[in-house]
Image (cartoon, grey):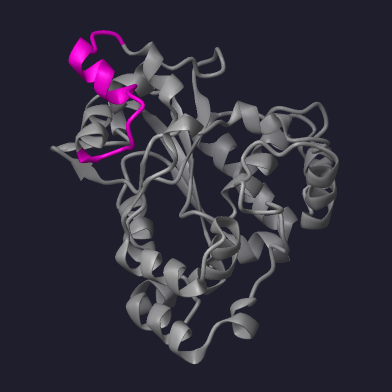
Amino acid sequence: MKKCFWITSYPKSGNTWLRLIIGGLFFTDNGKIENFEVLKKIPKIDTLKNFEFVKDISMEDYKIIFSDKTFDEKMFLTYFKYSTEAQKKINLNGGTFGFYKTHNARVKINDKFYTNENTSLGFIYIYRDPRDIIISYSKYLGQKYDDTIEFMINGQLRNPQKNEGRLPEIILNWGDHYNSWKKFNKVPSLFLKFEEIKENPAKEIYKIVNFFETNYNIEIKNKDLRIENIIQTSDFNKLKQIEQESFFPENQDNSSIFFRKGSSDQWKDNLSDNQINLISNRFKSEMKELKYY
């Protein structure tokens, strides 16, 4: 049975913000975001604990996946081999389907997609101006803009610390990441633009509501009130205040705050002409398509 509904994006494109909005629609009484508990209803898929549900893992493979060693290619290919089975076995909110976050590109390894169509109900993909991602991602990782630009242009395996309980993610470059999901046309999908949610949140949230009503026959009760409350309580200033008052579980040790400005066009005041050109020339086609160029 298809169970996984993906909330997907390139890193630092608004995925967590989108999960809070969806959490307000589905997992609150009235749409108000008062803490980050709703994020637990839309967890990361790429965690070791999801592989504890998988049966028939050979002892050799189990030792490789759950070893204390740093991730390497052999370990990655081993856990990838069981990824579809893991998606079938996880407890998806005790219902017929559940929401899951991923930053993985939709790629095929050893003739198998990580986000398999047989376990996927659909997805929402949120995208953002790659020049602003540079600013946000650099702050998040505590690194220089040039290092982030190199990562976004070349694409690679994002390799977290093993003690975080997370698995490597196949990020690819920014353009290939977007295109990999755009080509996934066998399930319902909705593409949302970060900047348009900022500019007109009501319009974009109604798009989400209509998407679920149309494709899954899911009725969201009191949707007008919910959307009004979501808009008031998911503003970035409100989220920064909540973060200051409570623990935010998905922050990096080297990032002082997770919810920063969420602003558009930060790149104009922060990036050099050469840095701008590197990104704009590399992703000219995708940026034109998405109206960033």
263 to 31, vertically: above or below: below
Q: x, y (%) of residue 235?
A: 79, 54
213, 246: nearer the viewer: 246
Q: Residue at x 46, y 83 (%)?
A: 275
Q: x, y (%) of residue 272?
A: 52, 87
Asked if the stretch drawn in magenta spans residue 292, the answer is: no
Location of the N terminus (image quadrant) = top left
Q: Is residue 172 left or right of residue 19?
A: left
Q: x, y (%) of residue 8?
A: 47, 45
**Could you tell me how many numbered marks the image carries?**
0
228, 15: nearer the viewer: 15
Q: Residue furthest left?
A: 110
Q: Is residue 56 left or right of residue 50?
A: left
12 to 122, vertically: above or below: below
Q: Residue at x 30, y 24 (%)?
A: 65
81 to 62, vertically: above or below: below
Q: x, y (%) of residue 179?
A: 33, 59
Regarding residue 220, the answer to whether it shows in the image is: no
Regarding residue 41, the answer to whether it shows in the image is: yes
Write down the region rendered in magenta: 55-73
Asked if the stretch drawn in magenta spans residue 62, the answer is: yes
275, 176: nearer the viewer: 275
Q: Residue furthest front?
A: 69
Q: Residue at x 54, y 61 (%)?
A: 137
Which of the 4 image quarters holds residue 118? top left
Which of the 4 image quarters holds residue 29? top right
